[in-house]
Image (cartoon, rainbow, N blue to C red):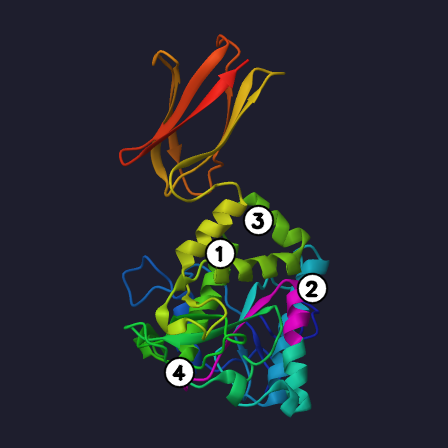
Amino acid sequence: MDDDENGFKDDYFGYNTVSMNGNLPLMSIHGTEVFGIMAAKADNGTGVAGVNWNVKLMPINNDLLFSEIVESYEYVLKMRKLYNESKGELGAFIVTTNASFGTSGFPSDMPVFSTWCEFYDSLGVAGILSVGATSNDAVDIDIEGDMPTSCTSDFLVTVTAISRTNALIGGYSSTNIDIAAPGDNSPSTKPNNGYGNISGTSAAAPHVAGAIALLYSTPCEEWAQYARDDPPGAALLMKDFLLRSAAPLDALKGKSVSGGLLDVKGAFDEIQNYCGSFTGALDILTLRSSISDGTISIDYQTPKEGPYTLRVFDALGRLLIDMPLNLEAFDKKTLELDVRSFARGVYFLSIENVENIVAKPFVVF
């Protein structure tokens, strides 16, 4: 029964394009392995932990017929559009899809391939950044072709696999493969409460999809507001965060767009910078004096969270301000100090922790 009147029967957990209802197979080995990498629960002393250990999944079953692949994406798109149009009352806030499947060929080979590729743009306009696994063979995708990683949509992150020794073990292309992720005996879940390993690009892709979902959940109101106000812009910016922060690998030079391996912490730092919680080597980025209201404004960055101390000295070395800074993730690293009681002259501001110290002068007029 279509209880929520969304046009689909019993799709409480997801959708089955074969039976056209919400009845999903419980014994999918490949699907269970992929889900485990993305989203296995953590902190429970059991099995493995997913890249994002507290996330909702929307499983969609099909027989990998090309028409059913397109139908699967149609379902995802409808659910996200319902969410957008109802301001969260209906549908689902889907931020990524994962395709740990594919076939050889180019988008121009078959009309359904072109339709498949075009759907990534449609999903992206709604705010969904999709992920696709490339070939498990170390072949040049520009020559051999691969679906979906030969699709040229800006809203698709194409993923190859890296071994535990940082060797390339999947398809490559300097234009069509974006990034690499682990794909060599990655621990994951199995049916019947089991655990085991999965290898190949099917393992690599869900690392990226799980990371996207995790990064969307970062506690930054500026990012959350941007994702609400401009869903496609947020999806493209998320892709930029992922590729810009990728850890460089020699095996990927000239063989992927980013030339690197997924670095979730690096992407997290990119979002922190976007949110004004600047991350990098300890530094005072800007130090501005305001004549009109007797304040100084400071923007600074730190390499990590934790305790820091801000101090202000006069030209004779006398300590005037001694302020603890106990930083947590996504804390704003912007301060304003009242210096109206200071005499005219040159002063020095420092920020330090147990490992380092930086200082800059400023002038009170």
Q: Is residue 192 visible?
A: yes
Image location of residue 130, percent across then percent down:
56, 70
The mark closer to the camera, 1 or 2, is: 1
* Quadrant containing the C terminus in the rendered view: top right
Residue 85 occupies quadrant: bottom right
Residue 348 rendering spot, x and y as whole percentages = 41, 21
Q: Secondary structure at mark 1?
A: helix
Task: Give the amino acid at mark 3.
Answer: Trp
Of labels 1 and 2, earlier in sequence is 2
Q: Nearer the viewer, residue 190 or 113?
A: 113
Depth order, front residue of 340/365: 365
Q: What segment is highlighted magenta in the picture? A: 119-137
Q: Which residue is mark 4?
A: 29
Residue ID at (52%, 22%)? 296
* Mark 4–mark 2 CB contact (< 8 Å): no
Circle 2: residue type: Leu
Label 4 to label 2: alpha-carbon separation: 31 Å
Category of crowding for the residue at label 4, using alpha-carbon neighbours closer than 10 angstroms: few (below 14), some (14–19), many (at least 20): few
Instruction: Provide residue 86's location: percent of width, then percent of height.
Output: 71, 58
**Residue 84 falls in which quadrant of the image?**
bottom right
Q: Earlier in the sequence, mark 1 or mark 3?
A: 1
1 and 3 marks in contact (CB < 8 Å): no
> Mark 2, residues whose alpha carbon is within 10 Å: few (<14), some, or many (≥20)?
some
Q: Which numbered disc, 4 or 1, marks the residue that appears first in the sequence?
A: 4
Between marks 4 and 1, how big is the CA–CA gap? 27 Å
Q: Which residue is mark 1?
A: 215
Q: Is residue 92 left or right of residue 138?
A: right
**Within-10-Å neighbours for mark 1: few <14, some 14–19, many 20+:** many
Q: Secondary structure at mark 2?
A: helix
Residue 223 badge: 3
